[in-house]
Amino acid sequence: MAGNVKVMVAPGRYVQGQGAIFEIGRHVKKLGKKALVIGGKTGLASTREGREKSFAENGISQVEELFGGECSSAEIERLSNLAREKECDVIVASGGGKAIDTAKAVAAAVNARTVIVPTIASSDAPCSAMSVIYKDDGTIERFFIPPTNPDLVLVDTEIIAKAPVRMLVAGMGDALATWLEADAACQSGARNPARGLPTSAAMALARLCFDILMEYGLQAKIANERQAVTTALEKVVEANILLSGIGFESGGVAAAHSLQDGLNMLEECHDFYHGEKIGFLALVQMVLEGRPKELIQQVYEFNYKVGLPITLADLHIDNISEERLREAVAVSCKPKAIIYNHAFPITEELVFDAILTADEMGKRIKAGQPIV
Ligand SMILES: [Zn+2]
């Protein structure tokens, strides 16, 4: 493979706004005639009224099916069989991360088009191609990359505004790391998850993602607390879902997401969302890299004010033994891990020390003491 080939991937169409679900039919009409709609109880309910009305107006029929809760091979097979039996040519996810990943895999299995309607903005999964398939015991079985990204991602901000605030904040944590990781990977010449170098466009979107969070993150959280749709909420939803999605997949990934693989071993933090863990790990990455002090200060303050973790205690892993924390670091630093997508040598020792220092800096922020 040539060394300098750039690759950028994105969803075929992105639609976002208050009441956007009432327009879903005119976008889905271009993709197919019969939809299999999967999601949890809440995920299906929150889109039902707009979906039924808009599908009817546009001559699209639909079959709703309650999602089993885990993106597993068995569930993908069950839903694929259903899609074949009902002759559905569009698979719609109406819900969160696991329903979304399941829809991507089912659509690939039955050669149907993929439509993602996220009802929470808690991660950057909706716009990416990637699907994480789990075993029935909840551990990761494999990563599946369908041949294309979703054909349509439609986000109704009215629905997002009514979802729990913690979800939006977790999404901000996931989005916070996007530019930091893409920038690190770009500087090192690492390939992105789409297996190419980053385009200038992807890097610009990753940076915009970061800037929007800094400018509007807290205001968006406040709006979400009152279930209100504001300009700030719209901007942050776009950052969490679109900009972060393209930013990570076409920009690049590095230490923060690699460390999350290690943290997965520690059951003490299993109750935290992916984005909450990433929010803290973005701080660890900045310490590891020795980023400029103004940036470090800015991101610590951001996390603290929006309610993202800034210490190990915030993730319930302050009392684990040094040995277990070192084991988690070792998992993150296994050969070929994305933690090596930095332009300087990474050692387990450096990573461990960055975690301790990031934790200490978080404690000082809470105590009102200077950190830089
Ligand atoms: Zn992530």
Image: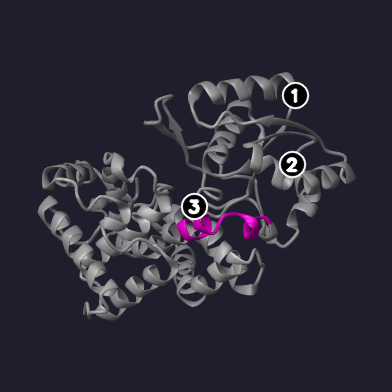
Q: Residue at x 31, y 64 (%)?
A: 310
Disc 3 beta carbon < 8 A from ligand 1? yes
Amino acid, disc 2: Leu
Task: Specify which label sits upstream in the sequence, 1 or 3.
Answer: 1
Q: Residue at x 87, y 44 (%)?
A: 58
Is 149 located above or below residue 139 in the figure?
below
Residue 262 lies, in percent from the top left, at: 26, 44
Check residue 31 in the rendering and tell me which mark sits there, or answer none. Answer: 2
Q: Are marks 1 and 2 in contact (CB under 8 Å)?
A: no
Q: In which quadrant of the rendered view does residue 34 lie?
A: top right
Task: Specify which label sits upstream in the sequence, 2 or 3.
Answer: 2
Structural crowding at the residue carrying mark 3, measured as other residues with C-alpha within 10 Å and reported as few (<14), some (14–19) or many (≥20): many
Quadrant (top left, top right, bottom left, bottom right) of the C terminus: bottom left
Residue at image mark 1: 87
Camera sees residue 93:
no
Query: Relative to 359, is 94 on the left or the right?
Result: right
Residue at image mark 3: 123
Task: Specify which label sits upstream in the sequence, 1 or 2.
Answer: 2
> Is residue 109 located in the magenta-colored stretch of the structure?
no
Is 5 located above or below residue 91 in the figure?
below
